[in-house]
Image: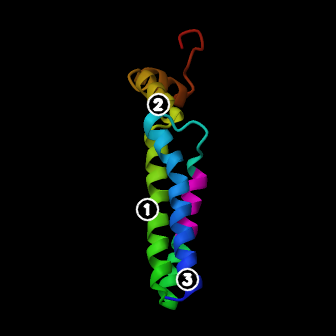
Amino acid sequence: MHFIESIYFMSGLLAVCAGMPQLLKIVKTRSSEGFYVATWVFWVFSQSISLTYSIFIGAVSYMILNIIWIGFYISMVLLILRYSESKRLSLRFLSTYATVPSRVKGLLTGNNNIDKL
């Protein structure tokens, strides 16, 4: 391993460690407010391309670092989804309205009376 490659690898590991407080914040607060899942999904996609490239050129240290990053990003995505407030709100909405099929049927058929809803 070349000197610059060692520095790259160490800085990458430190960068992952620097992101850990975000992950821990979600776990401790049980809230992912302020974290946008689309951003983290994009990072998974981007890092996957980087992993593909590192495999293509045969750079083992890059592969390892990319796998670590992908693991971190996937963890963030899963935690954001798990503790998402909008998910909880949508589940409450569904549980409220899924139990009243006549309301949905009326909305779909156009035979609805706004006073009864």
- State the count of labels: 3
**Quadrant, the C terminus:** top right
Label 1 secondary element: helix
Q: Is residue 8 above or below residue 75?
A: below
**Residue stretch rendered in magenta on the structure:** 38-47
Using the rendered view, name the quadrant where residue 97 is placed.
Answer: top left
Asked whether residue 30 is in view, the answer is no
Q: Is residue 105 above or below residue 79?
A: above
Find the distance from the CA under tag 2 to the CA under tag 1: 25 Å
Do labels 2 and 1 touch, CB within 8 Å?
no
Q: Amino acid at mark 2?
A: Arg
Numbered disc in front, either 2 or 1: 1
Label 2 secondary element: helix
Which residue is denoted by mark 3 in the rendering?
A: 5
Q: Is residue 42 left or right of residue 70?
A: right
Q: Nearer the viewer, residue 95 or 45?
A: 45
Which residue shows up at 50% across the image and 66% down it?
13
Q: Earlier in the sequence, mark 2 or mark 1?
A: 1
Image coordinates of residue 22 in percent, x first then y, are 53, 46
Report crowding for label 1: few under 14, some 14 to 19, many 20 or more residues within 10 A (C-alpha).
few
Magenta stretch holds residue 99: no
Which residue is denoted by mark 2 in the rendering?
A: 88
Label 3 secondary element: helix
Q: Amino acid at mark 1?
A: Gly
